[in-house]
Amino acid sequence: MKQNNLMKKATPYLFILPWIIGFLVFTIGPLIFSLVMSFFDWPLTADPTFVGIGNYVKMFTSDKQFLKSLTISLKYAAIFVPLNMIIALFLAMLITQPVKGVKIFRTIYYIPTVISGVAVSILWGWILNGDYGVLNYLLSLIGIKGPKWLVDPAWALLAVIIASAFGVGSMMLIFYTDIKNIPIDVYEAAAIDGANPARQFFSITLPIITPTILFNLITSIISSFQQVTLVMLLTGGGPLKSTYFYGLYTYNNAFKHHKLGYASANAWVMFVIILCLTALVFKSSSAWVFYETEAGGTEKKKKRGGKK
C-alpha cells in the first residue's frame, strides 16, 4: 500500500525528470559556470588566472566600448520595443476583422517569424541597399532620395530596427488570441451605448489585453538586448561601430578576441540590466495591468460584505 502511494507521488516527477535534467545541465549549469568564469582571465589557449572582480572593474573604468555598446543597445530597445508592440497590435486588430481571406493575411503576417535570421538578414540587405535596394526605389517613386541605410552611421541603427520589426508574427499571434477571447457581447453593449470603434478599442480591448501587453513587453525587452544574429549579418556592427550592439560586443569578446572570462562578465552585466528592467516593469504593472480574476475576487468580497 505504501509502495503504491509512493509510486503515485513519484510518477509526475518521473514525467518531468527529462526536463529537469535538461534545465540543470543546459541552463543552470552553464549559468553558474559563466559566473565563475567572469572572475577569471580565461584565454582560449592558456590556463585561466583568477582576477576577482578585475573584469568588472576593467569594464566600467577602462573599456570605452562597453558604455558605447550599452548605449546603442538601450537606444535600440527604446525604439524597437514600443514600435514592435504597436505594429503587432495593429496587425492583430486587422486580422480579427471579419473580412474575406483573413486567414491568408494571418499566414502572410506570420511567415517572417519562421524564416531563419540568416535569410532575413540577406533579404533586408537587398531591400536596404542604398544603390539598388527596393526601399530606396519605392521612395524614389514619390520623389524622395533614400539614404545609404547600411553604410551611413546616422541611418544604420534605424535600418536594423526596421529589419527587426519584420519578425512581429509571434507577438501578433499572442495579441490576436487574446483579442479573440474577448466576449462579443461586451462590444455589442458598448455599440448600443453609442461607443464608436476607437472608443471600444481604448475602453474595452486595450484594458482587457493588458496582461498580454505586459508579457509581450517583457519578452520584447529581453529579445532587444539579445539581438546578435541580425546585426552581425546585416551590418557587422558598422559602419564606424554605430550598430555595435552589446550582444555583438559580448560575442566578439568571447569568440573573436578569445577573452572568455571578460565576455562572461559582459554577459552577467547584461543579465543584471535585463533583470532590473523586468523588475521595474513588474513593479509598475500593478498600476496599469487589469486581471479579470482580481476584479472577480473584489466583486465577490463586495457581495459578501453586502450580505453582512
Image (tube, rainbow, N blue to C red):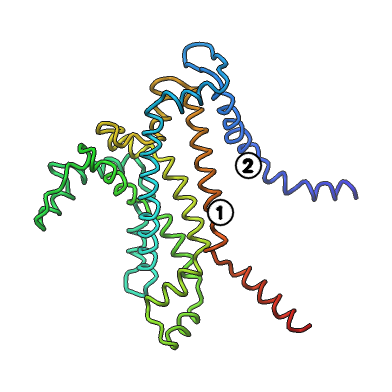
Q: Image quadrant of residue 152?
A: top left
Residue 185 on image: x %, y %: 50, 82
Residue 159: x and y in percent read 26, 45
Is 231 rendered above or below residue 212? above
- Location of residue 199 in the rendering, given as x and y in whole percent from the top left corner: 40, 77
Quarter of the C terminus within the rendering: bottom right
Q: Which residue is mark 1?
A: 282
The answer to whether residue 28 is above or below residue 222 is: above
**Foreground residue, 6 or 197?**
197
Q: Residue at left 50%, top 47%?
A: 277
Rendering coords of residue 214 (x, y %): 50, 58
Q: On screen, 151 above or below 258? A: below
Near mark 1 (Cα within 10 A), the count class, few <14, some 14-19 or many ≥20, is some
- In front here: 234 or 242? 242
Task: Tell me the element at label 2.
Answer: helix
Within the image, what quadrant is residue 93 found in? bottom left
Residue at x 43%, y 55% (from the top left corner): 170
The residue wearing badge 2 is: 19
Q: How many marks?
A: 2
Q: Tell me: residue 285, above or below residue 20.
A: below
Q: Residue furthest right?
A: 1
Residue located at (48% from left, 16% from top) = 43
Residue type pointed to by label 2? Trp
Q: Nearer the viewer, residue 273 or 173?
A: 273
